[in-house]
Image: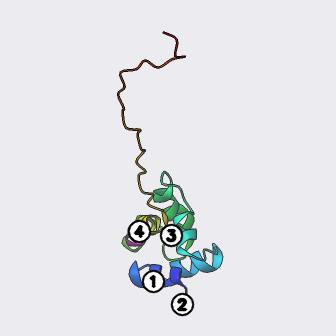
Amino acid sequence: MSTLTHFLSNDSKIDAQIVNYMTKTVQMESITDFANFWTTADFEKGVQDDVVKQVPGFQDASQPAARIQIARLRVAWRRARDQTTAKLPIKKTRTMPHTSTDKPVGMGWT
């Protein structure tokens, strides 16, 4: 069982028909593939239209079984996205310490 299949089936409780569609037909191979399949702006509609509504038995998105799978896939996508998005640390910039001199800065002419 692939990591993606385990993630979707066992961890996210996605129906086996939907998992099969995603891995065999759409050919998602990894959690990263799943996380990057949609943008943040379009994943909510994407899991419904691109996946769930394409699987026999779930094509009517108003039915409870389809709605549950859509909701679970949305949560799974967010979890996958969180796992695969690198959390880059905020780099602090170093500032030069302020040194005060009584001498003027310039060409040295007085």
Q: Residue furthest top?
A: 110
**Residue 13 vertical position relative to residue 37 in the rendered view, above or below:** below
2 relative to 101, above or below: below
Alpha carbons under labels 3 and 1: distance apart: 14 Å
Instruction: Confirm whether the magenta stretch covers residue 70.
Output: yes
In the image, the segment drawn in magenta is 68-76
Write the residue at 43% across / 51% down.
Answer: 91
Q: Which residue is mark 4?
A: 79
Q: Nearer the viewer, mark 1 or mark 2?
A: 2
Percent from the top left, x then y, of residue 56? 54, 76
Residue 52's disc number: 3
* Circle 1: residue type: Ser
Mark 1 burial class by Cα count in 10 Å: few <14, some 14-19, many 20+: some
Residue 36: image location, x then y, percent = 56, 63
Q: Position of residue 12 (x, y in %)?
A: 40, 77
- Within-10-Å neighbours for mark 2: few <14, some 14–19, many 20+: few
Discs 1, 2 touching: Cβ within 8 Å: yes
Q: Nearer the viewer, mark 4 or mark 3?
A: 4
**Mark with earlier residue (1, 2):** 2
In primary-sequence order, the first of circles 3 and 1 is 1
Residue that mark 2 sits on: 1
